[in-house]
């Protein structure tokens, strides 16, 4: 990574950390901090969405700062993650419909699959070009 | 695509990191180009050619 690329990566890490904190606030705040006050929850929701949008722009800036091979690696990882995410989401939902799942599928399961797939495909793509 | 990047770099006693810095790309990209695992875009090929004061055809061979 060149010094020109390090800055957007640090910025993305900060935005991602902020988004995790804002999500945690939205998840636990209503129960533990403001006892389900609707106004406070709406503020937390607005904060989470705003930080999420900031993270999105930061990610875009970070990808643009990469060189052409690194962008290609990111594209390959993102495409594979999207494809696996779609396949997983479709099958997962169906498993509940045909009563093969004893619990309700939630979006967090999909997010875990997406995150793991992205990390694995990124490592595989990086290794391929070494 | 075959290329003479490694030879040209060695002639100047540059490391992959040196060349990467001069071309404003990552060391991994230089390594991948040298090994023929990645073909550079036309703008990057021109930057490489300009750096070594050669034509693109003198560095890259598409056969």
Image: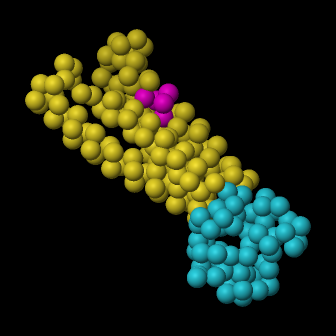
Chain colours: A yellow, B cyan
Which residue occupies 75% across, 82% down?
B50
Q: Which quarter of the figure has residue B52? A: bottom right
Dividing the image into 4 quarters, which one contains the C terminus of chain B?
A: bottom right
Which residue occupies 62% across, 68% down?
B36
Residue A67's place in the image compared with A80, above or below, is below
Which residue occupies 44% across, 36% down?
A116
Residue A119's place in the image compared with A72, above or below, is above
Whether residue A114 is visible to the viewer of this picture, yes or no, is yes
Magenta region, residue range: A19-23
Nearest the eye: B53 or A67: B53
Dividing the image into 4 quarters, which one contains the N terminus of chain B?
A: bottom right
Dominant SS in magenta: helix
Instruction: Please check the rendered image and state whether residue A109 is part of the magenta-colored stretch, yes or no.
Output: no
Nearest the eye: A33 or B19: B19
Nearest the eye: A60 or A35: A60
* Residue B12: image location, x then y, percent: 88, 72
Residue B56's place in the image compared with A124, above or below, is below
Q: Which quarter of the figure has residue A84? A: top left
Q: Name the side, left or right, on which A99 lies relative to A128.
A: left
Q: Name the side, left or right, on which A112 lies relative to A107.
A: right
**Residue at the limit of the structure toward the front, as seen here:** B63
Badge count: 0
* Residue A122: image location, x then y, percent: 51, 47
* Residue A5: image location, x then y, percent: 67, 54
Whether residue A57 is visible to the viewer of this picture, yes or no, is no
Which residue occupies 75% across, 63% down?
B20
Nearest the eye: A61 or B15: B15
Q: Name the side, left or right, on which A83 lies relative to B20.
A: left
Q: Name the side, left or right, on which A2 lies relative to A81.
A: right
* Residue B11: image location, x then y, percent: 87, 73
**Residue at the limit of the structure toward the left, as seen here:** A98
């Amino acid at each position: 990574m060149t010094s020109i690329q390090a800055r957007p990566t640090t910025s993305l890490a900060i935005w991602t950390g902020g988004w995790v904190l804002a999500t945690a606030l939205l998840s636990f705040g209503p129960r533990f901090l403001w006892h389900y006050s609707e106004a406070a929850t709406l503020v937390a929701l607005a904060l989470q969405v705003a930080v999420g949008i900031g993270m999105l722009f930061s990610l875009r800036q970070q990808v643009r700062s990469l060189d052409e091979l690194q962008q290609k690696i990111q594209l390959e990882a993102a495409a594979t993650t999207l494809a696996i995410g779609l396949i997983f989401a479709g099958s997962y939902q169906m498993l509940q419909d045909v009563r093969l799942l004893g619990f309700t599928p939630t979006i967090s399961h999909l997010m875990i699959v997406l995150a793991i797939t992205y990390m694995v495909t990124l490592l595989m793509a990086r290794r391929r070009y070494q | 695509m075959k290329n003479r990047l490694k030879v040209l770099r060695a002639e100047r006693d540059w490391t992959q990191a040196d060349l990467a810095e001069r071309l404003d790309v990552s060391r991994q990209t230089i390594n991948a180009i040298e090994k023929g695992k990645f073909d550079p875009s036309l703008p990057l090929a021109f930057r490489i050619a300009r750096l070594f004061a050669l034509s693109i055809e003198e560095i890259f061979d598409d056969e």
